[in-house]
Amino acid sequence: MAQQDKPLLIKRYASRRLYNTETSDYVTLEDIAGFIRSGREVQIVDLKSGDDLTRQYLLQIIAEHESRGENVLPVTVLNDLVRSYMVPGGGMMPQFLQSSFDMLRDNQTKMMENMSAMNPMAKMPGFEAIQAQQEAFLKAMTGGMSGSWSGPAPEEKPNQAETSEDLDAIKQQLADLQDKLSKLK
């Protein structure tokens, strides 16, 4: 298993300091947030008890960003999350959130594929730079949720009609998301 495929193991000492086992140095919550933004999974465990503290620290990272005015979660979503704790068994919220983020990652990948596949602009000088900027923008907008994308395999030759339909579907989904975002404001 490749080093990047395994979660980065962070150990919490009794002094509450966090220790990166790969680089043998202490890290902060902001360092951990950086690892996650770059696409790395982390696992935080208590050195003495062996308890998994990952969820607790990830929630703390989110809370710190929200308290600094970096609001990502609308109040209505936060209210729904709190309500989901009142439902026996947690309700459907965890499955809904997981499915939503999975769909977002999948759609991001499809959009990147459609931007490259069958694009006549791909032959223009500087297109790679524009594409890299678009990928960076999407990664920033989604908090780095996507895995690394290497483009379609060379032997893939998508059907023009299918590609057009996929692109239309993605455009419609994007318009729907923009509409929902504008209603949230």
Image: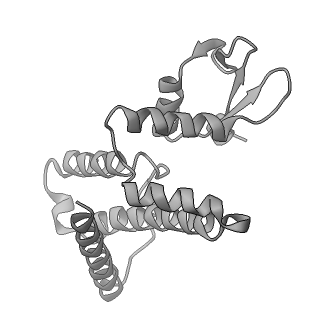
Q: Residue at x 51, y 41 (%)?
A: 39
Q: Is residue 158 left or right of residue 33?
A: left
Picture quarter with the C terminus = bottom left
**Residue 144, position in %: x, y?**
43, 46
Q: Nearer the viewer, residue 69 or 82?
A: 82
Q: Residue at x 76, y 14 (%)?
A: 14
Picture quarter with the N terminus = top right
Specify the farthest residue to the bottom: 161
**Residue 121, position in %: x, y?**
16, 63
Residue 110 lies in quadrant? bottom left
Q: Residue at x 61, y 33 (%)?
A: 57
Q: Is residue 82 left or right of residue 50?
A: left
**Residue 103, position in %: x, y?**
48, 68
Q: Is residue 35 left or right of residue 143?
A: right
Q: Nearer the viewer, residue 134 or 71?
A: 71
Residue 72 position (above or below residue 182)? above
Residue 72 position (above or below residue 4)? below
Residue 183 position (above or below residue 53)? below
Q: Residue at x 81, y 33 (%)?
A: 51
**Colour convention of the picture:** one colour
